[in-house]
Amino acid sequence: MLDEPAAPWSGEPPLATASGVSSASLRDDELVDAYSRTVTRVAQKVGPATAKIDVSRSRGGPRRPQRAEGGSGSGFVFTPDGFLITNSHVVHGSARTVVTLPGGEPQHARLVGDDPHTDLAVLSIGGHDLPYVAFGESKRLQVGSIAIAIGNPFGFGWTVTAGVVSALGRSLRTESGRLIDDVVQTDAALNPGNSGGPLVGSDSRVIGVNTAIFLRSQGICFAIAADTAQWIATTLLRAGHVRRGYLGVAAQTAPLPTRLVRHHGLREQTGAFVTSVEAGAPAARAGLRDGDIIVELAGRPIAGVDDLHRTLSEEPQSHPTEIRILRGPHLLPLKIHPTPDKRH
């Protein structure tokens, strides 16, 4: 009996090239080259607007002699006339702040405003037609998106690291003790001195302001989301400080079920998901619970944490107002009495 011929190969074998390298390998090389070109292009565009920030502080007291201490961090220009954003912890309490842009001379910077609660500050060096970086929309970010960090770690000069967005909606406690909501987690390597530098996407727009490293682990770093940073920067430019109402909740931006959006006629596709309620706070007195989703406050739609903070900063405080929440499938109106936020 004759052996039956082997079944024909139904797949597509790698095509061999003259050098013996498969087309699959070539495609991998092309992908790596495309990624490399993206990082290079972003670094070339954002790098000129990324600043080294050197600060000096006076330490001491009535019984101890004054002594000067120095520190450094990063920041970036976000307007062509010389306004920069950085971390509050980089410049807070500084007696002297000096900003150096790539290829430029050191310049004294003026503190425009400082918000320790979000670990953000705005500086001014003045100027015309300076290289600057535009803000992107962090609410459009997805886990896995390219994340490129630029800064000046250890004073070694401008450094670029690249990775991805590892997680969204994280919370981070600042030195003031306040929780920052909607923090971006990335595995783009950060080191001391990166603080205040930009975290940017593949379109060269800022998706976050680098702020912290999780010291007990590798590859876990955090950035203040661009939507929060842009709102804080605008507020500091206008008023020099951020006035807040206080509810006593921790929250994160979360998508709403489409069927509930349609059923209740909601104006946004996302809301502020309550992760915890502080005992005795205005939110607790109003009846909010963990797991509620805030969709409206004082008649304004709440698409997420930034909308919630923005509304609390703009609405009159110490007056009862209505808050609308989703609790399971039900849309509930509650009366809430925000108070001025006096925490430091």
Image: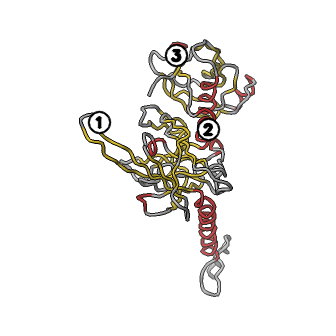
Q: Nearer the viewer, residue 83 or 68?
A: 68
The spot of residue 124 in percent (x, y) is: 57, 46
Q: Secondary structure at mark 1?
A: strand
Q: Quadrant of the N terminus?
A: bottom right
Q: Choose the circle earlier in sequence order: 2 or 1.
A: 1
Measure how far apart labels 1 and 3 are at the Cα level.
Answer: 39 Å
Q: Choose the circle earlier in sequence order: 1 or 3.
A: 1
Q: Residue at x 52, y 46 (%)?
A: 86
Look at label 2 and name its amino acid: Leu
Q: Residues within 10 Å of mark 1 (few under 14, many from 20)?
A: few
Residue named by callout 1 = 61
Mark seen at residue 282: 3
Q: Secondary structure at mark 3?
A: helix
Q: Quadrant of the C terminus?
A: top left
Which quadrant holds residue 64? Answer: top left
> Residue lying furthest left in this view?
63
Q: Residue at x 44, y 37 (%)?
A: 174
Q: Residues within 10 Å of mark 2 (few under 14, many from 20)?
A: some
Residue named by callout 2 = 237
Look at label 1 and name its amino acid: Gly
